[in-house]
Image: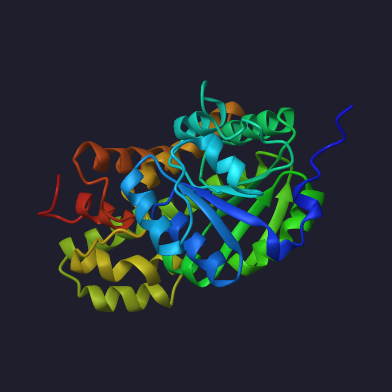
């Protein structure tokens, strides 16, 4: 009887070969960070092949044309993909997927996905003789590059402990939260509350502007009262200046608030404030504003901007 993955755990941690699937801004900077820390980054893959090839040239590694080739090249494979459909494709697609000859490998899945999708990936990896961890990120692109991510991890705690030296190189803080799917649940809560706060701030500043108040004064008063929040620090200036360079897109905000909406429905819970926030971010996507930063929700609330 198969007793569980062994290959990965027999290798001293600094000799672990690492690969990345999904080489957008977060995935690429995570790969750069581990390369800087002395890990052997052996392969990168992206559906946008020029993106993967450029990163491979920078890091001096391979850019396999197949997902199976990525698995063959590494002991630890990080995935940073866009949504449930993309995740299902890399793990479960017929003909080519990451689980081909995957015995003994460890997959660390960092994308914000539904808990059900993370559980599906975990089960499929286990059936293939591989291990699977969630590593939900609550951080920005610069944090990925500097090894200052905040990570919420889930899966088998023994597996987490064995890969902890690598995780510590990538994160300033981290929390193991429970079995497969639980990190995705917690990340959905984090982004739900963040997006609600962002939408509320946009409405407060929009109403203040319509009343003719000085927005610098309003922001200072907000910071000293119950209206204070983390997004007041990060987004208020951009909302007032209409500067919405993307760090966390409105499209991703719509997706993540929608994930929380779906989770709530599975437990029979009404979340009307989240429903309204989800609708606002979905409206941004419909209006072609989905590529703006989440602060761009102010474009829907300030008079004279988008209706």
In the image, is residue 201 above or below residue 300? below
Q: x, y percentage for residue 221?
A: 35, 76
Name the residue located 39 percent from the left edge and 47 percent from the top edge.
253
- The quadrant in which the C terminus is found is top left
In the image, is residue 245 above or below residue 191? below
Name the residue located 26 percent from the left edge and 62 percent from the top edge.
245
> Left of 54 or right of it: where is 85?
right
Judged from this view, the residue extending furthest toward the top is 94
In the image, is residue 160 above or below residue 286? below
Coloring scheme of the render? rainbow
| Nearest to the observer: residue 174 or residue 59 | 59
Q: x, y percentage for residue 237?
A: 28, 71
| Nearest to the observer: residue 104 or residue 199 | 104
> Left of 301 or right of it: where is 223?
right
> Left of 48 or right of it: where is 107?
right
Name the residue located 68 percent from the left edge and 57 percent from the top edge.
16
Q: x, y percentage for residue 180?
A: 69, 39
Judged from this view, the residue extending furthest toward the left is 304
Q: Quadrant of residue 206?
A: bottom left
Q: In the rendered image, is residue 153 in sight? A: yes
> Left of 164 or right of it: where is 213?
left
How many numbered circles are shown?
Answer: 0
Q: In the rendered image, is residue 227 in sight? A: no
Q: x, y percentage for residue 27?
A: 47, 55
| Nearest to the observer: residue 69 or residue 267 | 69
Name the residue located 14 percent from the left edge and 48 percent from the top edge.
306
């Amino acid at each position: 009887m198969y007793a569980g993955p062994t290959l990965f755990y027999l290798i001293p941690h600094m000799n672990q070969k690492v690969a990345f699937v999904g080489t957008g801004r977060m995935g690429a900077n995570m790969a750069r960070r581990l390369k800087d820390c002395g890990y052997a980054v052996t392969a990168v893959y992206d559906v946008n092949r020029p993106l993967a090839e450029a990163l491979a040239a920078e890091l001096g590694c391979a850019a396999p044309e197949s997902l199976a080739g990525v698995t063959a090249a590494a002991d630890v494979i990080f995935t940073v993909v866009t949504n449930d459909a993309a995740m299902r494709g890399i793990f479960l697609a017929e003909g080519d997927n990451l689980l081909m000859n995957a015995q003994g490998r460890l997959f660390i899945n960092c994308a914000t996905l539904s808990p059900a999708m993370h559980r599906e990936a975990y089960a499929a990896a286990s059936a293939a003789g591989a291990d699977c961890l969630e590593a939900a990120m609550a951080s920005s692109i610069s944090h990925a590059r500097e090894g200052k991510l905040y990570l919420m991890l889930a899966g088998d705690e023994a597996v987490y402990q064995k890969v902890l030296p690598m995780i510590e190189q990538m994160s300033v803080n981290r929390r193991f939260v429970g079995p497969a799917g639980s990190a995705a649940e917690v990340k959905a809560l984090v982004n739900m509350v963040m997006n609600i706060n962002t939408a509320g701030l946009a409405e407060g500043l929009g109403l203040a502007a319509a009343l003719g108040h000085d927005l610098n004064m309003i922001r200072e008063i907000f910071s000293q009262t119950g209206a204070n929040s983390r997004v007041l620090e990060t987004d208020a200036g951009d909302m007032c200046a209409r500067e919405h360079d993307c760090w966390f897109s409105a499209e991703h905000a719509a997706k993540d608030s929608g994930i929380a909406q779906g989770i709530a429905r599975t437990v029979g819970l009404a979340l009307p404030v989240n429903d309204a926030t989800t609708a606002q971010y979905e409206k941004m996507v419909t209006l072609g504003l989905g590529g703006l930063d989440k602060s761009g929700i102010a474009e829907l609330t300030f008079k004279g901007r988008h209706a």
